[in-house]
Amino acid sequence: MPQTVLSLSTRRQGLYEFTAEVTAFVRASGLSEGLLTAFVRHTSCSLLIQENADPDVQRDLKEFFRRLVPPGDDASMRWMVHTTEGPDDMPAHIKAALTATSLGIPVMGGRLALGTWQGIYLFEHRDRPHRREVVLHLSA
């Protein structure tokens, strides 16, 4: 079964679309029917399928999660014990726990079965730049 590891660079918290890279992997595999699994190999970021047409969606999602899980130096988060990697680390772990570390996407006719406005995103939950690895695996 075809598989690969994508290396994605992030600059700060936010959503980073990588649909084109996944589409290229599926096309190169030659499989016409199957299931693509995407798995992120980290505990402070996650994967999402989300709208890719209106950038306000990304802005609103980022703001929602910031309000839901404020930075660790916020007074409401002073209960956290894990602080050795900075005030954004434990909140990043919580956000990753609330979202997904893997996605399953059907492949039909050699193409991802995504809807018209759907894109595949890495959701970075840390403040500083990171290099993230996403494992892609296709099964027939």
Image: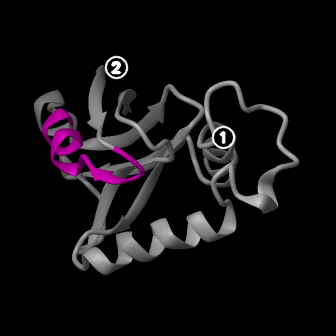
Residue underneath mark 2: 1
State which quarter of the image contains the C terminus: top left
In the image, taking residue 104 as reference, residue 59 lies left or right, namely left
Q: Is residue 124 above or below residue 54?
A: above
Classify mark 1: helix, strand or loop.
Answer: helix
Amino acid found under the numbered disc labelled 1: His
Residue underneath mark 1: 93
Q: Examine the image and state in which quarter residue 48 appears.
A: bottom left
Alpha-carbon span between mark 1 and mark 2: 31 Å
In the image, taking residue 93 as reference, residue 10 lies left or right, namely left
Amino acid found under the numbered disc labelled 2: Met
Q: Examine the image and state in which quarter residue 92 appears.
A: top right
State which quarter of the image contains the N terminus: top left
Residue 21 counted in the magenta span: yes
In the image, taking residue 116 as reference, residue 133 lies left or right, namely right
User: Where residue 113 is drawn, which disc sits there?
Assistant: none
In the rendered image, residue 114, in percent from the top left (x then y), is placed at: 30, 63
What residue is at 72 percent from the left and 32 percent from the top? Answer: 83
In the image, taking residue 134 as reference, residue 26 lies left or right, namely left
In the rendered image, residue 12, in percent from the top left (x then y), is placed at: 37, 46
Residue lying farthest to the right in this orientation: 79
Q: Residues within 10 Å of mark 1 (few under 14, many from 20)?
A: some
The mark closer to the camera, 1 or 2, is 1
In the rendered image, residue 104, in percent from the top left (x then y), is placed at: 47, 46
Q: Residues within 10 Å of mark 2 (few under 14, many from 20)?
A: few
Q: Is residue 130 above or below residue 49?
A: above
Residues rendered magenta in the picture: 12-25
